[in-house]
Image (cartoon, helix red, strand yellow):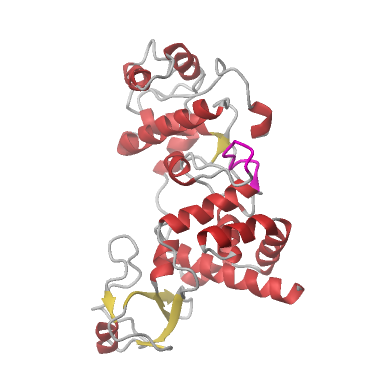
Amino acid sequence: MTLRGVIGKKLAIACVLGALGTNASLATAAGEFNPADNADVRKMVDELTQQGYTRSTLNAIMAKASHQQSIINAMNRPAERHLRWDEYRNIFIQPKRARLGAEFIRTHREAMDKAEREYGVPPEIIAAIIGVETNYGGNKGSYRVLDALSTLAFDYPKRATFFRKELISYLQITLAQGLDPAEMKGSYAGAMGYPQFMPSSYQAYAVDFNGDGIKDLWDEPEDAIGSVGNYFAKHHWRKGAPIYVEANGPADKPDNIDFNNVRNGGLNTSIQALESAGVTAAGNLPSDAKVLPMALDFEDGHYRYVLGMHNFYVITRYNHSHMYGMAVATLAEQIKAALAQES
């Protein structure tokens, strides 16, 4: 059911919410997170009631919550082996995805142009984010968002605090917009809609870009386009500034440079330090510039050296991965080229 189809539904039918705070409770039928029987869920309901929400509505929602063991299994799955850049690139960077990105821009040209005017973010970047996240809306997730967030909020102690906050945000979103929380679908981690926003990001950055009174990231691509643009603007995207520059470097990656660090490093490596290690920018950069150095590895053992600039770092605020950032930047380049070929 689309978002439009659930507007106005009474919220006495609903969804999820966590369990005993441990993995000991592995029930799968709805009702295991009923506030009447679960102190942790009841505590959350108390918190929301103090914010002015109706307890009976919240209780009805929580009583229909369902634990999803497959989500716990996915979260506990051992990390995959390190993917080289060429492997990661091939997952997201294909001619078809670039063509679809160009088509997505053409289909929603008015919203794309509006987003560029208001936020300074070019259409190919917005399209690339949506293309990487959901293949332009083709794969927005199949889990009920409340099931996902509730399972992780109450049955996954390692991240319970984070996901409980996200669950509260999701309840606030659906209650404010008159949505049935049992209907909305997303990823197993609770990411939602075309751009896969977590609920807290939804609250902070989602916009009603088509002016219909609803911030709909599930079924209205215009709202998703505006929301991605707003996200980037709020993270200080610089209109017209470069994303990265190529660099030259030694066959062996220098040990004294902190490569690929988008979480804690950011733009903290000087051009002088890079040059001392044998890494030089292929283009002209100010001598006092700070960059995010990357060494992208390939099957044959060679590295491609790239220096991320401010706008690259902004992309990685969406997903804290240097390879994600390069995938978005590369796909955006290919989308722009595909648009140029077809114009």
Q: Is residue 144 visible?
A: yes
Residue that appears at 27% across and 71% down? 268
Residue pictured at 36% horizontal, 22% vertical: 51
Give me the residue at 46% from left, 65% from top: 325
Q: Main secondary structure of the magenta part?
A: loop
Where in the figure is residue 297, as x and y percent of width and height? Answer: 43, 75
Q: As displayed, is residue 234 above or below residue 70?
A: below
Q: Is residue 89 magenta?
A: no
Query: x, y percentage for residue 272?
Result: 25, 86
Examine the image and state in which quarter residue 46 appears.
top left
Q: In front here: 10 or 302?
A: 10
Q: Position of residue 23 (x, y in %)?
A: 36, 28
Is residue 328 or residue 254 the one in the foreground?
328
Quadrant for the C terminus in the image: bottom right
* Residue 212 is a magenta residue: yes
| Span highlighted in magenta in the image | 211-221
Q: Position of residue 276 (x, y in %)?
A: 25, 88
